Amino acid sequence: MSQQLPASQDVLIADPFDFARRGGVINGTVDARSFERLADVLEEGAGLDQRVRYHLQGLRQDDKLFIVLQLEGAIGLGCQRCLQAVPHVLESENRLMLLAEGEALPDEALEDDSCDPINVGHNFDVLAAVEDEILLSLPISPMHDSCETPAAAVAKAKDSPFSVLAQLKSDKGNK
Ligand SMILES: [Zn+2]
């Protein structure tokens, strides 16, 4: 079963400062496979559809403007041991503090690690921000809690033909 998805179209916020000021909202779903920088680390399987839901909310707080970015979904990454898909659950919320292009970071932002400052101009690229957020969330070496390298699985089967035979018998017995 393969699904053909239309190529992702750019989602742009023409004026991110205005978006934040008026508490704008943008929702959408994106196929993670459409992200160039992410495509290499994705692995199909485990019933994962590689889709990520995103929710952006403009926010004004203490005279500062933010875009709150929430992600939700599950993508498949290649397991470093068995090479099969290992699910990576995305459930994040990040506050992006909007700074004009060339605007220096205010001192208090350095101490506040609950948000990430970003310099933005016109046409804020929503999907690029979503991709950045996913890339930051990736584990260094994704791995199942318990699995075997393909070579180890083969070696085990060779080592004990009787256990394989016993397994076959018990499978039959169950039917
Ligand atoms: Zn594995």
Image: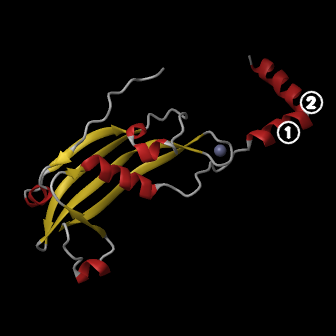
Q: What is the x, y in percent for residue 39? A: 47, 41
Please, what is the three-letter code of the amino acid marked with disc 1? Ala
Residue at the image point whose x is 73% and y is 44% from the top: 148
Q: What is the x, y in percent for residue 86? A: 57, 43
Q: What is the x, y in percent for residue 12? A: 19, 46
Residue, far front: 102
Chain-order first, disc 1 or disc 2: 1
Q: Dividing the image into four equal quarters, which quarter contains ligand 1?
A: top right
159 lies above or below 19: above
Please, what is the three-letter code of the amino acid marked with disc 2? Phe
- CA–CA distance between discs 1 and 2? 14 Å
Please tell me which residue lies in front, 171 or 94: 94
Residue at the image point whose x is 58% and y is 51% from the top: 142
30 lies above or below 92: above
Dot in front, 1 or 2: 1
Please tell me which residue lies in front, 137 or 173: 137
Whether tag 1 and tag 2 are in contact, CB under 8 A, the answer is no
User: Image quadrant of residue 94?
Assistant: bottom left
> Circle 1 sits in a helix, a strand or a loop, which is it?
helix
Q: What is the x, y in percent for residue 48? A: 48, 35
> Circle 2 sits in a helix, a strand or a loop, which is it?
helix
How did the renderer colour the structure?
A: secondary structure
**171 sits to left or right of 26:** right
User: Image quadrant of residue 163?
Assistant: top right
Q: State the residue position of label 1.
A: 155
Residue at the image point whose x is 24% and y is 41% from the top: 10
In the rendered picture of this protein, how many numbered marks are placed on residues?
2
Quadrant of the frame with the C terminus = top right
Mark seen at residue 162:
2
